[in-house]
């Protein structure tokens, strides 16, 4: 079988951790142990090759339990919810807590902004709520498993806006 890996079939630590569904700290530990096949350090950054399935390959450890990292493609859709209660709380208390919830499998992250790099759909079901969220959301964004999602977090936005208005 011919090796079809090219320079684009390599990722950094953040992308590799996302693909394997593990933390970046765990991935860096595996890198220090030399357990990622073909991983090389270029200056300060790790370059990790992907196999034919688009996943980094990890060699199994010699002892302890078997690894629980994601060995295949993600199978479940990602659900993105806008948290109305957080928006109301931020308005009433002049805060800027994250008001977007991104749910992928068992993982639930909150953030201020989400960039979806692919197809998605917005679903509104007032009579059939999504029970995967507390309270049962009636409006959500659904993203296919292979689509990458970038989460962004911000500092207190009011401070930044006030400073910008005051400098004009």
Image: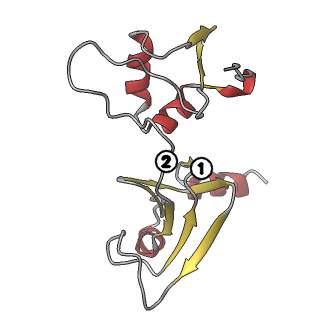
Q: Residue at x 44, y 21 (%)?
A: 58
- Which numbered disc, 1 or 2, marks the residue that appears first in the sequence? 2
Q: Residues within 10 Å of mark 1 (few under 14, many from 20)?
A: some
- Work out whether 137 lies above or below 56: below
Q: SS for tag 1?
A: loop
Q: Which residue is mark 2?
A: 74
Percent coordinates x, y for residue 4 in the rendering: 72, 23
Q: Residue at x 61, y 21 (%)?
A: 49
Which part of the image, by quadrant, shows the C terminus?
A: bottom right
Which part of the image, by quadrant, shows the N terminus?
A: top right
Left or right? Give the position of 22 relative to 2.
Answer: left
Q: Nearer the viewer, residue 53 or 154?
A: 53
Percent coordinates x, y for residue 14 in the rendering: 54, 31
Percent coordinates x, y for residue 111 in the rendering: 50, 54
Q: Which residue is mark 1?
A: 146
Residue 123 is tagged as none
Q: Nearer the viewer, residue 152 or 122?
A: 122
Quadrant in which residue 105 is drawn: bottom left
Seen as rendered, the residue at the extreme right is 168
- Work out whether 37 lies above or below 119: above
Q: SS for tag 2?
A: loop
Seen as rendered, the residue at the extreme bottom is 127
Q: Circles 1 and 2: CB distance less than 8 Å?
A: yes
Seen as rendered, the residue at the extreme left is 64
Percent coordinates x, y for residue 80 in the rendering: 51, 64
- Work out whether 82 lies above or below 119: below
Quadrant in which residue 44 is drawn: top right
Left or right? Give the position of 143 relative to 84.
Answer: right
Q: Residue at x 58, y 61 (%)?
A: 143
Quadrant in which residue 21 is drawn: top left
* Mark pair 1, 2: CA separation: 7 Å
Left or right? Give the position of 118 relative to 95.
Answer: right
């Amino acid at each position: 079988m011919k090796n079809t890996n090219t320079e684009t079939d390599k990722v950094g630590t953040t992308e590799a951790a996302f693909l394997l569904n593990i933390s970046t700290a765990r991935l860096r530990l595996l890198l220090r142990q030399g357990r990622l096949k073909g991983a090389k350090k270029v200056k300060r950054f790790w370059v990790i090759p992907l196999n034919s399935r688009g996943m980094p390959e990890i060699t199994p450890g010699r002892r302890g339990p078997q690894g629980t990292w994601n060995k295949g493609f993600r199978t479940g859709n990602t659900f993105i919810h806008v948290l109305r209660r957080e928006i109301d709380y931020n308005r009433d208390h002049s805060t800027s807590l994250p008001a977007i919830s991104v749910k992928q499998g068992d993982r639930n992250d909150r953030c201020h902004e989400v960039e979806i790099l692919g197809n998605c759909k917005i679903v509104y079901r007032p009579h059939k709520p999504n029970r995967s969220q507390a309270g049962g959301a009636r409006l959500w964004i659904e993203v296919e498993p292979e689509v990458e999602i970038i989460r962004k977090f911000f500092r207190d936005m009011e401070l930044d806006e006030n400073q910008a208005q005051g400098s004009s």
